Amino acid sequence: MHHAFKLEENEYNLELSRAEAGYRLHLADRTLPVSVNLHLEDDGSAVLTVNGRSEKVLVATRGDDVFIHLGGVAYQLRYEHPLQRLAAQSQGSAEDHIRAPMPGSLVALHAKPGQAVARGEALLVMESMKMETTIAAPRDGVIEAVHFAVGQTFDRDALLLSLVAAVVEGKNS
């Protein structure tokens, strides 16, 4: 089965097939056995085991986004549905509303209304559970509105920024 994932700003197209003990990952001319287990602990942390190697992680999810704090670094992993990928490629409105993946506070803001931004550009930094997460632009566009100021707190799924398509020479881009 074909899957598309984004890890931070990089897209990965993967083929997975079921195996006796987990899955097989097909990458170009290689096939790798993959076994993933996520065990949630009482303190809100989790133990992530990949191919027998276990690490303690902090995990937060929002829809298809998974935020993982591992080894002092925060990562954002997103499963991309094929229809959403097509909308984003055609500069559709699927990614015009940037929402908070978890409750937190705004610690840095790198964008303002009217500013043109490129896909992958850092827009803001939020803090949640003593972990900082950088939120990047999901596509090229222009910041329509910023809904929180530095120091303000927000709930999970709060609308942080609104994005609109950039207009270039009478065309949307």
Image: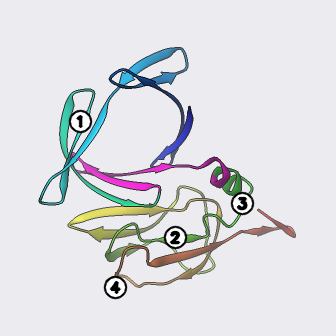
Query: From the viewer's perspective, is 87 left or right of 38?
Result: right
Q: Secondary structure at mark 1?
A: strand
Label 2: element kind: strand
Q: Report x, y in % for residue 91.
A: 72, 60
Q: Nearer the viewer, mark 1 or mark 3?
A: 1
Q: Secondary structure at mark 3?
A: loop
Q: Residues within 10 Å of mark 4 (few under 14, many from 20)?
A: few
> Going from the N terminus, do you reach mark 1 or mark 3 first?
1
Indicate which disc, 3 or 2, sits on the residue closer to the N terminus.
Answer: 3
Residue 72 placement (x, y as % from top left): 22, 50
> Which residue is denoted by mark 3 in the rendering?
91
Amino acid beneath label 2: Ile
The mark that comes first in sequence, 1 or 2, is: 1
Estimate the spatial distance between the alpha carbons at disc 4 and disc 2, rounded to whole Å.
Answer: 16 Å
Question: What percent of the width, then of the height, locates residue 156?
Answer: 37, 74
Q: Residue at x 18, y 60 (%)?
A: 44
Q: Which residue is mark 2?
A: 98
Few, some or many C-alpha atoms within 10 Å of disc 1 (few <14, some 14-19, many ≥20)?
some
Residue ID for mark 1: 49
**Residue type at numbered disc 4:** Gln
Residue shown at the point (64%, 55%) measured from the top left: 84
Residue 76 magenta: yes
- In this view, the residue in front, 65 or 23, is 23
- For the residues labelled 1 and 4, the Cα–Cα distance comes to 36 Å
* Amino acid identity at mark 3: Gln
The residue identified by callout 4 is: 152
Residue 95 quadrant: bottom right
Q: Where's residue 155, x and y in %?
A: 35, 79
**Badge 3: few (under 14), some or many (20 or more) residues near its Cα, within 10 Å?**
some
Magenta span includes 60: no
Task: Judge left or right: residue 42 versus residue 32.
Answer: left
The stretch of residues the image draws in magenta is 64-84
